Amino acid sequence: MKHIKSNISEIRKSILVKDIMTTKVFSLAKECTADAAVNIMAKKKISTILVCDKNNPIGIVTERDIISKLLFMNKDKNKTKLLDIMSKHLVTINPESSILKASSAMKSKKVRKLVVVDSENRLLGILSQTDIIRSMNRINENYRHLLWNPWFSALLFLAITALFILNWLIFRK
């Protein structure tokens, strides 16, 4: 019985952005060249570089930005500044927000990554769709243990039986 309660509590407990976000984020100044971003992305095998001004994020450069704003436009990566190719409209989120709120923000803003900032807009991390999907495995494990627990099945059977008897007692003629 105690095991069932702990599973139910775990499922009810919201998973927060801070629990699953990536904290190792690479950032560059807006004056840096696209070449610097491309080199870091290739060496570190990452898809995103944040553009910051004194640890405050002001833009984001993704692989998609590199392709569409640099390569497709035939710009020189050694002369093009990050300021010229970064996406300037960052979608940010608080680390205490739930992943449900984060997912909704991604969907409504049509972005794949959220920049995690504190109340003073300082960079704390980044949350991607991949981070959220990985967290679903943990939720799935909690549900699986709960649903296959014999005590849960017995309690569910007793609850349904009690409701059936109560319904029969109230509505019988």
Image (spheres, grey):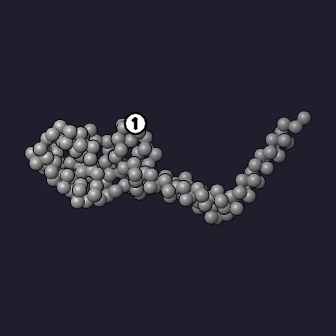
Q: Give neighbour class at mark 1: few <14, some 14-19, many 20+ (Cα, 10 Å).
A: few
Which of the 4 quarters of the picture holds residue 149? bottom right
According to the picture, the residue beneath numbered tag 1 turns out to be 108
Q: Quadrant of residue 82?
A: top left
Q: Is residue 172 depicted above or below 165 in this figure?
A: above
Q: Nearer the viewer, residue 47 or 29?
A: 47
What amino acid does circle 1 point to?
Ser
Rendered location of residue 34, percent (x, y): 16, 48
Image height of 92 relative to 26, above or below: above
Q: Nearer the viewer, residue 18 or 170?
A: 18
Q: Describe residue 42's horizontal placement relative to residue 154 as left or right.
A: left
- Which quadrant is home to the N terminus? bottom right
Residue at image coords 64%, 64%: 2
Horizontal relation, residue 161 to residue 69: left or right: right
Using the rendered image of the protein, determine whether residue 143 is visible from the camera's viewpoint: yes
Q: Position of residue 132 (x, y in %)?
A: 43, 51
* Residue 54 appears anywhere in the view: no
Q: What is the x, y in percent for residue 27?
A: 21, 53
Identify the residue at the far left of this view.
79
Residue at image point 41% right, 57% down: 19
What residue sits 36% from the left and 38% below the top?
110
Q: Foreground residue, 76 or 13?
A: 76
Q: Position of residue 13 (x, y in %)?
A: 52, 54
For numbered disc 1, what is the local secondary structure? Answer: helix
Quadrant (top left/top right/bottom left/bottom right) for the C terminus? top right
> At x 20% / y 49%, what residue is drawn?
52
Horizontally, residue 48 falls left or right of residue 6, namely left
